[in-house]
Image (cartoon, rainbow, N blue to C red):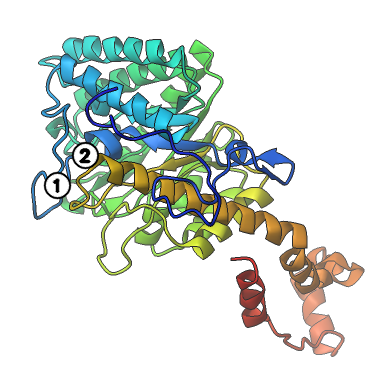
Amino acid sequence: MTEFFVDIAPVRFEGPDSTNPLAFRHYDPDEMVMGKRMEDHLRFAVAYWHSFAWEGNDPFGGQTLIRPWQPQDDMERARIKADAAFEMFDILGVPYFCWHDADIRPEGASFAESLRNFEEIIDYFLAKMESRKTRLLWGTANMFSHRRWMAGASTNPDPDVFAYAAATVKTCMDATHRMGGQNYVLWGGREGYETLLNTDMGRELDHMGRFLSMVVDYKHKIGFKGAILVEPKPQEPSKHQYDFDAATCIGFLRKYGLEDEVKLNLEQGHAILAGHSFEHEIAVAAAEGMLGSIDMNRNDYQSGWDTDQFPNNVPEVALCYYHILRAGGFTTGGTNFDAKLRRQSLDASDLIAAHVGGMDICARGLKAAAAMIEDGGLEAALRERYAGWDSAHGQGILESDLDSLFARVVAGEIDPHPRSGRQEMLENHVNRFV
C-alpha cells in the first residue's frame, strides 16, 4: 500500500442501517435488478483526472490538495500516482476507470518523449490489471490544456496542430485498444470559437468532421471493437462550442455521415450548462439510438459554471436511469464519475467517501428506475396519451395531405378537445419510488 490509503479498508455493503461513512448502504454489486447484477447495470468507473490529477485549484485560487505524487513532472511520481489509483480501485471494487493521456504521464520536451512516457505508464497499468478485475471503460486525449490547443485541435486554423492532434489521438486509441477499453471518447474542449472576427466556421466544422472520420477509419484499421463516443459541452471553456448539446452533436454526426459509427458520452454538468436536464439529454440520445455512456456528476445550480460535484439527488438520478433502462441499458458504456472533491476536502478518506456516496446515490436511482418500469404506470400513461395515433383515425391523418385535412376540419369532422397532460399526477407517481 502507498502511504495515501494505508489505513482505509476495502468498502463493503453493510445495508441501509449502517452508520459507517465508508460502507455502501445501497450499492450491493451482486443484487439482482431486473434480472441483472447491479454492478453490471451501473458499470462504475473512476475518472483518473479529477481523482488523481486535479490539485484543488479553481479560477480564483491555487492548489489545496497535497498528494504524494505531486508535482506530477516525472515518471517516478507517475508510477506512485498509478499505485494509489489502483489501490483506490481495489478499495471501491469498481469494475472500470477512465483516463486522458495527460493525466497519467508527465509532458515531455517533445512529442516523442511524451509518447515514451505514455507507453511506459500504459505498460505499468497493464501489469497491475493482470491481477485485478478493474478494466478500462474508455481512454481519451487531452487536447485542451496545453497552449498548443488554445485555438482548438481539429478545428485549429493551423494545419500542423490538426496533424499533432491526429498523432495524439492515434497513440491514445492504440493504448485504449491494448488495454481492452470498452470505448474511445473525444471531447472537443477547445473545438469552438471566441469571436467570429477571426473564425471561418464552415471550414472548422468540415475539418472536425474530417478528423472524426479519420478516427472511425483508424478504429476499423486496428480492429478496435469498442464504441467511438463524442461528448457534448456548451460554453466552457470556449464561449461557442461546436458540440453544444446532444441534439447539436447528432445533427453534426448526420451531416458528416457518421451517425452509424459514433455515439454520445453525456454528462450531467454539461447538460445543465446547456440549459437542459440530464434526463433530457439522455432521452434525446436514446430516441436517436446514439446513447453510449454517461459521466455522472452534478453542478451547483447557482454558480453558472461546471463544478463537477458528486451526485446527491436521487430523484434526478432515478429519472436518468429510467431512460437508460428504457433504452435497453448500457452495452459498452457505463457510469463514469467525472466528479471531484471540494477544495476543502483534503483527506484520502474524503476521496473514498465521495465515491461511496455517489455509488449509493446511483444504486438508489437505479432501483427506483427499475421499480418504475416494473410498475408500468408511466408507460401506461404514455400509451393512453398517444393512443389516438395507434387508431385507424390517427394513422389516416398521418397518411393524408393538407387539402384533405383542411376539408375534414372545415366540415366539422375533426374538432379537437384538449385533454389534461396530468403532469402533477405523474410527478406524484414518480415520488412513490424515490
The label number, if any, that marks residue 113 in the structure image? none
Residue at 65% x, 42% y is 31
Residue at 57% x, 60% y is 319
Q: In the figure, residue 106 lies in which quadrant? A: top left
Residue at 53% x, 64% y is 315
201 relative to 231 in the view: left or right: left
Q: Is residue 252 visible?
A: no
Which class describes the residues within 10 Å of circle 1: few (<14), some (14-19), or many (20+)? few
Instruction: Quickly name the residue at label 1.
Output: 57
Instruction: Tell which of 392 and 180 is nearer to you.
Output: 180
Instruction: Check if mark 2's residue and mark 1's residue have beta carbons within 8 Å.
Output: yes
Residue at 91% x, 68% y is 392
Amino acid marked by disc 2: Trp
Return the x and y of residue 278 as percentages of the image width and height.
48, 57
Q: In the figure, residue 311 lies in which quadrant? A: bottom left
Residue ranking furthest to the right? 392
Instruction: Quickly name the residue at label 2.
Output: 54
Which class describes the residues within 10 Å of circle 2: few (<14), some (14-19), or many (20+)? some
Return the x and y of residue 154 as percentages of the image width and height.
30, 32
